[in-house]
Amino acid sequence: MDLPVWKNGDECYFDIEINPSSTEVSLTYSIDIDLTSGNHPLPSGSTVLRCELYTGNNTMADSTETFNTTTATISGSIELSNKQPLTSSSIRRYRIYCGIPNNASITDGEEFNVNPVITIDQDI
């Protein structure tokens, strides 16, 4: 598989999926994104542009939140319905878009990582 070639002004994205299928308790979660942390962060000045939420197997976004910052926190909860175990309709998928600034210094073949911190608490 060929890796993407990044250039100044590009927009990229990554997905995070929270799949509580078969879970028998409600849960709350938090996704903390810091584009300046990690071993190979995105170039200086990169920003989290927006986040789209997809629920269950939806292919259309249920909602979009705009950030335009180097850090972002996304949080939510998934509640039980009638004390029944959660199913695939409870899946939450987040597509997080990032922007690389026009004046970024990028070396040909350079790889970047985004290392979100994901915290999930079961509500017992």
Image: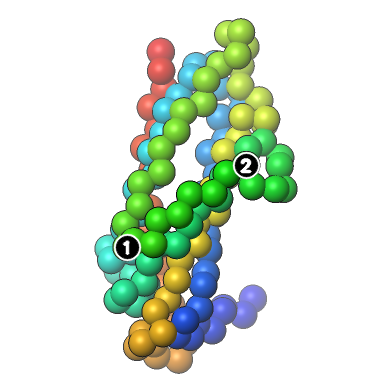
Residue at (63, 38) in percent of width and height:
55
- Quadrant location, the N terminus: bottom right
Q: Position of residue 61 (x, y in %)?
A: 64, 47
Please tell me which of labels 1 and 2 falls first in the chain.
2
Percent position of residue 45, x then y: 31, 74
Whether residue 1 is situated above or below residue 17 in the rendered picture:
below
According to the picture, the residue beneath numbered tag 1 turns out to be: 70
- Residue at point 45% right, 91% down? 108
Q: Position of residue 63 (x, y in %)?
A: 57, 44
Q: Given the image, on which type of amino acid does mark 2 rest? A: Asp
Disc 1 is placed on an element classified as: loop
Picture layout, residue 112 above or below residue 5: above
The residue drawn where x is 48% and y is 19% is 26
**Which residue is outermost to the bottom?**
108
Disc 1 residue crowd, few under 14, some 14–19, many 20+, Cα 10 Å: some
**What mark, if any, has residue 113 been given in the picture?**
none
